[in-house]
Image (cartoon, rainbow, N blue to C red):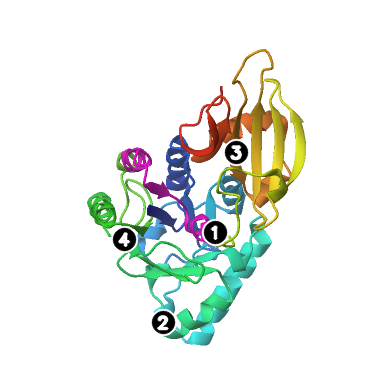
Amino acid sequence: MHLVTLGFDDGFLKSNLKIAEIFEKHHLAACFNIIAIGHRPEYVPPDPYQAGPKKGDFKLWNELQARGHEIQPHGYRHANKANLPLGESQALIRDCLALFQAELAGFSPKESVFAFPYSTTTPELEQWLPTEVRAFRAGGTGLNPLPHPQMNRLGTTGFGPGNCDQHLDEHVAKLLAQPSGWLVYTGHGLDDEGWGPLSAGYLDQLLGRLTAIPTVNVLPPGAALRQCQRPANCKCETPPFLFADSVEKEIGTDSFGATVSLHRCKCCGKTWLKYLMEEAHFTKSGRWWRVAVPGEVCASVTAKMARPFIEQQPWCFIGGSYFESTGKLQSSPIKIM
């Protein structure tokens, strides 16, 4: 198994909109690491790479989060924490997390991944920060072991100030040459924006290439870490799925005659959306699709939105007599028929 996490720092408006579009084309979620006051008039850009491009605001970050992307904190004002006293660094991080709690829907510091500005830190900060957040991103080779419950430091790499396409490509090759691992790579903007930009065309091509490899998952950091937090006895990602292992809530029937329901795992608490189709006049017609649903989406699930929601996901479980399976993994593209 190989994991790839591409994070995009600093919140450039034009680039982030294009990045989201490219990731959605491949049914993937992007990760945007945002400076808490980067959009405010009082923000002072720390370098010329941030001085020009317009930044997004929390209205945009909430919209992108609602579309399935991950929004993570990147500091209060992009200060280099390695150059500050410990107390000042801690205060800036707490201010950043507090602003995120106030402005970003559903934000929980304990579930967040703090992306250090410049990827620089100190031993004292690294010892303290896991008491505030789930994990943090800091400098390294970019190649990490697969996520595990005790992991709280994600080593990252990047390249600049010029185009970083080749550098990223080389690190993807290094990852794939290993039996397994997790590449955490730091980008900024696209084409002409930010330090070490990626080419939009290259990003599109890279995601297409990675999603075609069965052993590769492209995930934002929070999602990758959540995958390893399931209790050892949890069965919600191991077919066959038994009725007794979850709590079912029926949503209704859509215009295609499919039964839509939510299933909350009794062990880990994860919620799954199930879409079931059966045609009594045809043999072996029973078929279902099952995808994980983020907690903030559960309350808004309707029978009408279930089908397009499932088809937009990077992977799902499918099963039933039509597929001659009690449950198997299906990667995108997902097409319900």
Task: Tell me the amino acid under the disc marked 1.
Answer: Arg
Of badges 3 and 1, the one in the foreground is 3
Image spot of residue 8 (x, y percent): 42, 55
- Circle 1 sits on which residue? 226
Residue 195 in magenta stretch? no
Q: Which mark is residue 47?
A: none
Q: Which residues are magenta?
A: 203-228
Classify mark 3: helix, strand or loop: strand
Which of the pair 284/81 is nearer the observer? 284
Give the CA separation, mark 3 to mark 1. 18 Å
| Marked residue nearer the N-terminal end (3 or 1) | 1
Residue in view at x 58 percent, y 60 percent? 230
Q: Which mark is residue 122?
A: 2
Q: Is residue 267 left or right of residue 152?
A: right
Residue 221 in magenta stretch? yes
Q: Are marks 3 and 4 in contact (CB under 8 Å)?
A: no
Give the CA separation, mark 3 to mark 4. 36 Å
Residue 77 seen by the camera: no
Task: Tell me the amino acid under the disc marked 2.
Answer: Thr
Give the CA separation, mark 2 to mark 3. 43 Å
Q: How would you rate the neighbour count of disc 4 (Cα within 10 Å): few for under 14, some for 14-19, many for 20 or more?
A: many
Task: Tell me the amino acid under the disc marked 4.
Answer: Gly
